[in-house]
Image (spheres, helix red, strand yellow):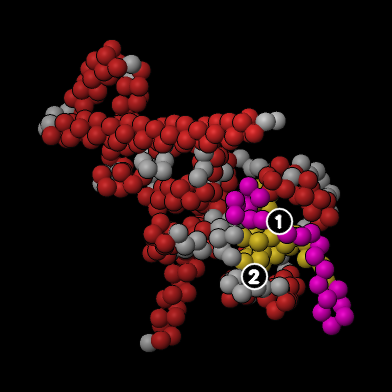
Amino acid sequence: MSKNTIESTGLFSAIRHLIETSKHNVAVSVNAEMTLLYWNIGKRINDEIGEQSRAESYGKQIVATLWRQLTNEYGASFSEKNLRRMMQFAEVFQDEKIVVSLIRQLSWTHIIALIPIENPLKRDFYIEMCKMDKWSVRTLRGRLDSLMFERTAISKKPEETIINEIEALRNEEKLSPDLVFKDPYFLDFLGLKNNYSEKDIEGAILAELQEFIIELGGDFAFMARQKRITIDNDDYYIDLLFYHRRLKCLVVIELKIGKFTAADKGQVELYLRWLEKYEKVEGENPPIGLILCTHKNEEHVELMQLDKSNIRVADYLTALPDKKLLEDKLHQSIEKAKNRLSQNASYNKEQEN
């Protein structure tokens, strides 16, 4: 290849990069401008309907007339369904400054997936996680369908804690373990049948490592399987060892078939202390343990105060249950957790008095 050809190839690559970057920037700019337009349209319609002291039928009449006029002139983007989405968009996000910030990173199709969420804290959780991990619309919908918020530890915390954690993520890009770890974990993609062993689970996870990391969360990096550690001339083996990039710590994952027991806590606590002494490097946070089992025994978890040991326990499901049943179970679990926190706070207050 001649020198001129090499130089020409380099020049072509550089110009191609400029063109692709410019096209991307134009697409982002157009998306932001169109989304802001949709918000302004929705707000204008809502204001018009709100100013009228007439029956609800008046609002329906306005929308019915308007969408026909707009569709005739500007096409299907202004159908009745889309106009109502714009109205809902403006109703859910009433502050224009928030909207302007939102549309810099999320597309209109992202917003369509987010606006039906009624709980503001739940909606904010998905917005910030979506921005942080740059989820595609397909990924966002998958997270919504899998009830990610309800499964994440933060959902079981007091409202004030949830607000503070989301604010820290939004303003400081600070991610806490409560925003990372979930319960239960869905391991249906492993294809495990009845009578499987812990080794079977490990093998299946390694075979489907990409799917497992997606379920764990995008910042997990696999480091080792059956990592050997030696304490007092005795060998121990950590099932799976990961590193979490944003939490800046090692994560031990122990797989258990059956119920969580007190002995499981002692075993993982030993692993964590060893890793903290021999493997933790400068700038890292203390390691975290995650015990995955088929039944976590709520009272055991509560009495052993696992948070103080940096250990988390979660169920794993090898087959997906009915979504409605799972949703009901998760909501009950959230309420129970919040009631326990409230009772503990009341007890501590009485003790102080």
Compared with 296, 80 (above or below) is above
Instruction: Check disc 1 and report the residue beneath it.
Output: 222
Q: Name the amino acid, label 1.
A: Phe
Which mark identifies residue 93? none
Residue at the extreme bottom of the image, as rendered: 353
Which residue occupies the foreground of this view, 212 or 25?
Answer: 25
**Image location of residue 175, percent across then percent down:** 50, 61
Which residue occupies the foreground of this view, 237 or 302?
Answer: 237
Tag 1–tag 2 contact (CB < 8 Å) = no
Residue at the extreme front of the image, as rendered: 3
Mark 1 falls on what kind of element? strand
**Image location of residue 326, percent across then percent down:** 58, 46
Lower position in the chain sequence, tag 1 or tag 2: 1
Residue count near mark 1 (Cα–Cα under 10 Å), binned few <14, some 14–19, many ≥20? some
Residue count near mark 2 (Cα–Cα under 10 Å), binned few <14, some 14–19, many ≥20? many
Instruction: Check disc 2 and report the residue beneath it.
Output: 287
Which residue occupies the foreground of this view, 169 or 298?
Answer: 169
The boundaries of the magenta stretch are 213-235
User: On the picture, is 241 further left or further right than 323?
Assistant: right
**Image location of residue 108, percent across then percent down:** 39, 34
Q: Residue at x 35, y 26 (%)?
A: 82
Residue at the extreme top of the image, as rendered: 72
Q: Name the amino acid, label 2.
A: Pro
